[in-house]
Image (cartoon, rainbow, N blue to C red):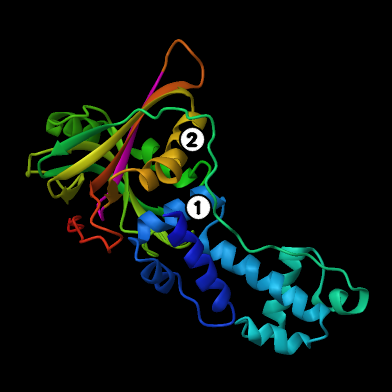
């Protein structure tokens, strides 16, 4: 995986002045979109779009230092107007493009390079489970795509669940884990970039098909799940587990992510403040090379 990531970095460098879509980058990498986006984000701390923007503006800065005109540099890196380029450049650097030319000041963002770093050999607990086809049923809402921090729209969704909805979910629940789960799917940008919306569902797992119009039903085909239990300060332990799944476990495992919803649940410890037990469930299959996922998720409602 590190080899593929570094090849992608080289590919981006060669196409910084082209119409470089994130979809084309994932196709070039030969890695399922969601899988690749997650690995890149957790290893680099940046989304792909952020990285490309930073590299383009860094190269633009160097071109301005070399005496190229602002107009030429703006259009070279895909901006439709000088005003748009100036706003983006000032937001990124803190100064205007004209300051680079007049005062020789600059800011840079170097090309990334991925290398293996051993961090103490901390073991990671996981188990593999097979599940038959089932449905997620619960309350859902379109919410803004957000990679980090608390998504306030999801908080509002949780607060909106009525007593009748809770009662029906409880009556339908008949599969492990017997917990209220959080599920995200159907992202506008296919989880490739931090923009647009996705559907978030708070609910339960069930094999039952009859569901009232109070709840949303999301069918999922039979598949394999990698389950990662974690316990500790919340939410930092859960976030660290998610990072390690994509940055450490997946690249070294014999599994790859498939195109199905991921879900998780959290049980807060009543005796210890901000302490919780959580599980992250990732849909996987044994690796068949780095081919595109085969669409194991049925998003019809």
Q: Which residue lies at the image location 32% right of the left edge and 60% below the top edge? A: 32
Nearer to me, 52 or 173: 52
Q: Position of residue 208 (x, y in %)?
A: 7, 39
Q: Quadrant of the N terminus?
A: bottom left
Furthest residue toward top: 271
Q: Position of residue 27 (x, y in %)?
A: 36, 70
Q: Which residue lies at the image location 14% right of the left edge and 39% below the top edge? A: 131
Q: CA distance from mark 1 to mark 2?
A: 13 Å
Q: Which residue is under mark 1?
A: 41
Q: Which residue lies at the image location 71% right of the left edge and 76% below the top edge? A: 60
**What range of the chain is rendered magenta?**
258-268
Furthest residue toward right: 103
Residue 99 lies in quadrant: bottom right
Q: Which residue is under mark 2?
A: 240
Residue 254 lies in quadrant: top left
Any part of residue 88 in sight? no
Eyeballing the image, is 249 above or below 114?
above
- Left or right placement of residue 216 versus residue 290 in this view: left
Q: Position of residue 182 (x, y in %)?
A: 33, 39
Q: Position of residue 118 (x, y in %)?
A: 53, 37
Mark closer to the chain start, 1 or 2 = 1
């Amino acid at each position: 995986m590190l080899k593929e990531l570094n090849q992608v970095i080289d590919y981006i460098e060669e196409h910084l002045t082209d119409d470089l879509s994130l979809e084309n980058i994932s196709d070039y990498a030969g890695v399922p979109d969601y899988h690749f986006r997650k690995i890149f984000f957790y290893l680099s701390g940046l989304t792909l779009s952020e990285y490309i923007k930073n590299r383009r503006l860094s190269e633009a800065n160097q071109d301005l230092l070399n005496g190229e005109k602002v107009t030429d540099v703006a259009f070279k890196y895909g901006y439709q107007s000088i005003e748009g380029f100036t706003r983006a450049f000032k937001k990124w650097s803190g100064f205007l493009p004209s300051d680079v030319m007049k005062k020789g000041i600059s800011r840079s963002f170097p090309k990334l390079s991925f290398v293996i770093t051993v961090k103490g050999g901390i073991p990671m607990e996981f188990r593999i489970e097979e599940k038959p086809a089932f449905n997620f049923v619960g309350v859902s809402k379109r919410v803004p795509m957000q990679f980090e921090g608390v998504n306030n729209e999801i908080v509002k969704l949780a607060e909106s669940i009525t007593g009748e909805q809770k009662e029906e979910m409880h009556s339908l629940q008949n599969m492990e884990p017997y917990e209220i789960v959080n599920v995200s799917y159907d992202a506008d940008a296919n989880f490739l970039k931090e923009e647009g919306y996705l559907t978030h569902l708070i609910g339960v797992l069930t094999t039952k098909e009859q569901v009232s119009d109070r709840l949303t039903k999301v069918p999922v085909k039979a598949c394999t799940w990698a389950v990662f239990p974690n316990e500790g300060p919340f939410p930092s332990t859960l976030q660290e587990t998610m990072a390690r799944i994509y940055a450490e476990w997946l690249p070294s495992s014999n599994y790859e992510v498939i195109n199905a919803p991921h879900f998780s649940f959290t049980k807060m410890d009543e005796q210890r403040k901000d302490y919780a037990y959580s599980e992250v469930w990732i849909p996987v299959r044994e690796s068949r090379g780095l081919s595109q996922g085969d669409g194991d998720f049925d998003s019809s409602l």
